Amino acid sequence: MLWSLLLFIITISILVTVHEFGHFFVARLCGVRVECFSIGFGKKIWSHKFSGGTEFVIAMIPLGGYVRMLDGNAKNLSTDEEKQVFDKKKIWQRAAIIFAGPFANFILAFILYWIIFMLGVVTYPVKIGSTIPDTPVATVNIPSGAELKKINNIQIESWNDVNFALMSILGQDDVTITYLINAGNNHQKEVSQRVDIRHWYFDIEKESAIKTFGLLPKTLEIYPIVSKIIPNSAAEKAGLQVGDKILSYNEHPYVDWNDFSAIIKKGDLIRLKIERENKNLYLDLMPSIQANGEGIAGLYPTSEAVIKQYGCLEGFGKGLEQTVLTTQLTIRSFYQLVTGVIGLNHLSGPITIAKSAGQTASYGFTPYLYFLAFISISLGVINLVPLPMLDGGHLIFLLFEKIKGKSLSIKAKERFYRFGFAFLLVIMGIALFNDVLRL
């Protein structure tokens, strides 16, 4: 729990810092004086004023942040200071400053996806094992072993892509799926079929989009051939080498990697029979014992899964593509929430975010980066919603000013702010209530 809380604070701090820096950076470009850049609210933990006149603050409550610009209502402003007031700037400059916060969140997500693709992503053929009766895809008779390539225009390279694509089509009438089948003589044939999804619905919190759509993945092939050995591991000490084929363990013929892994976890000495360069050898493997008491060997089998690393330019393109697709999915999900396609019970609050932060981080660095990018995009989209108290609401005020030639009165703005605050309070209450129910 403490680990999840710490990661929640780190996650929020990163996202808020980037968001507020977007406002700060463009404000300075437009000649607006920024008096304070604060990460968090409440009592100051640390502060420092730099030569530009901005005080940078880290505050006690790490659940947000703000950028405070020079107040045009302040008394005794000099002529130069008057020019640095936010309200004195042109409409396009003020709009740019406001939009820069959410835009910075999109930029952060793009950079994170770019890094992810350069670090490498696990890919393997997305093969269909079978289809589930009485589901949308069961009506088109996809053969077992077919390799899924596209859902509508979304390229499929992993089951994560499948889940992402299915989430994006929720609420549509039909969808086109494209897959490859074996046409004989080592040739493959591409097939495209339309699937009726007018009556397809599922509970996002409790059900799998892939399963309710009707797809069951084909079991990933794992071969008993060593593909990698961790340095200084039990496997290396036993004399195992990359390319060794495991024939048996403790006189039991090799059948399944999961069974072999279960034997390793027991932590007992294992008598291995392997094949190396067409010769059979016997080795003794003594697994290392982890903190949880389970044994570990430090070797990886050969499988259909591969880690695909993208170059700088290719990773740039993949990162941009993933950012656009995730943004589209987020906007669509928000629209479905507003129109009732998705129920309010799917709203999540800080407790769910904290749990997700801890879970993804426990899976590894890359899953956490995926999570951080997704939350960053969500924050950017939410802030552009045209509600007072949000950046989108301020942009609507500027649009009114551009059309009417004058800004809204202070009283009118106050009424809108009260409405926006009340609305957000209700939404936050529902999200927190949902969080508690999920505990």
Image (tube, rainbow, N blue to C red):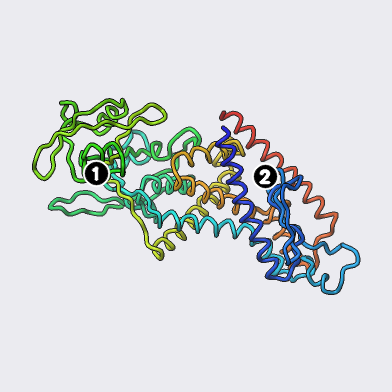
Residue at left offset 82%, top offset 62%: 71
Nearest the viewer among 424 and 202 is: 424
> What residue lies at 70% left-to-right and 50% top-to-bottom?
58
Residue placed furthest toward the left: 278
How far, Cα to Cα, is label 1 from label 2? 45 Å
Q: Amino acid at mark 1?
A: Thr
Question: Residue 46: percent from the left, percent from the top?
Answer: 72, 50
The residue wearing badge 2 is 62
Labelled disc at residue 302: 1
In this rendering, the answer to whether 73 lies above or below 239 is below
Secondary structure at badge 1 equals strand
Quadrant where the image shows the C terminus: top right
Q: Nearer the viewer, residue 215 or 107?
A: 107
Nearest the camera: 124 or 280?
Answer: 280
- Residue drawn at x 10%, y 37% is 280
Q: Amino acid at mark 2?
A: Pro
Q: Is residue 150 above or below residue 254?
A: below
